[in-house]
Amino acid sequence: MKNRKIMFMSPLEVETIEEVYVSGKLGEYELFVQLVYSLISPGTELAMLSGKEAWARLPICPGYSSVSRVLETGDGITEFKPGDLVFHYGSHSEYQVVAADQLLIKLPEDIDARWVPFTRMATVAFTSVRVSNIEIGDAVSITGLGLVGNMAAQLARLQGATVIGVDLSQERIQTAASCGLNFTLNGEVGDIKEQILRLTDGKGVSTHIEATGVAKVGVDSLAWIAKLGEIIFLGSPRGEYNADVTDILNYCHLYNRGCITFKGAHEWRFPTQPAEFVKHSLVRNSKIVFELMKQKRLHIEPLISHVIKPEQAREAYEGLRLNKDQYNGVLFDWS
């Protein structure tokens, strides 16, 4: 059979190729699936496309989050059958084999399949809330209102916080407002610290979630975090940034500078599968996201900017690189 797949051939060079798929005998606990939808993760995949990530040697087939239809199952598979729609961490390859012991969840019948690939972004965002001390009545700020930052803001809101979102893109700010954020600020308009202090009666926020991955943004945000507050690094820091490390550490150490707690929120701090002595896992978080989507408490539709064919991959990645205001949630439709 012919297999379409998206390839990063060299830095900034994207191609959609077609090759002959040679299928072998499935392992006992493997499934053969066909993609229905796959979602681009802008931060991770654009970093891969740059050619600067040591863990992603080019050429490579990227991919992050998928909904696929089961075509065939190994002899040991009992939970899934041909025809089932499943959510998994798949690549942008039309046909692929996935292992049942990886993250693999059958879709509920009453959920929009276009929404489900966004589950991966939501569980990435979930980590920031899981590691936080956010409680009802707290003030929380988020810098970066892309897919992950937007969902972190929505989840903090569901946690009972008053949420302030900050971004440079007016389009992303409008999207965040439509998703229920209490306040949205344009980072290029006025003094953000002054605006946040005004919104919090001069106290600052008890939790700040940094979702841009830009180190300077994280450092600048320390100034509006309340005493004994916390900063959570959700976006993976990339790029060189020079600063006075002693001054930064004093925000953590000195009470008169805030005595702020620094926390990391990388998704892989949690195991994939549920375990007896660990409350959180990627599977559990994913199933919770499904329920929030079904109840329409987590807003996905406003995040979908494009649903396109894999043959338009070059256009999609160019848009995400150069026109971030218009390109945000880009789904590939493999039907």
Image: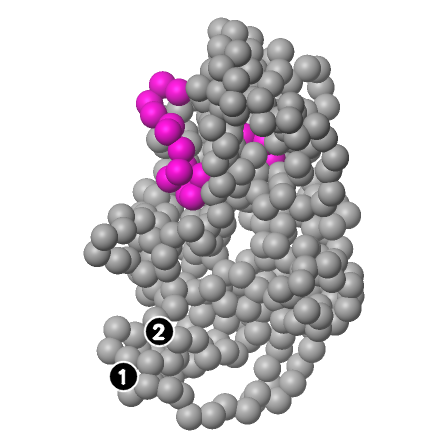
Secondary structure beneath disc 1? loop
> Does 266 sit left or right of 50 as displayed?
left
The residue identified by callout 2 is 100
Q: Quadrant of the C terminus?
A: bottom right
Q: What amino acid is labelled 1 in the image?
A: Gly
Residue assigned mark 1? 76
Q: Is residue 134 magenta?
A: yes
In primary-sequence order, the first of circles 2 and 1 is 1
User: Which residue lies at the image location 71% right of the left edge and 19% below the top edge?
Assistant: 189
Q: Is residue 102 visible?
A: yes
* Amino acid marked by disc 2: Ala
Disc number for residue 9:
none
| In the image, residue 120 lies in the stretch drawn in magenta | no
Classed neighbour count for the residue bearing mark 1: other residues with Cα under 10 Å, few (<14), some (14–19), many (≥20)? few
Q: Is residue 297 above or below residue 92?
A: above
Residue range of the region highlighted in magenta in the rendering: 126-145
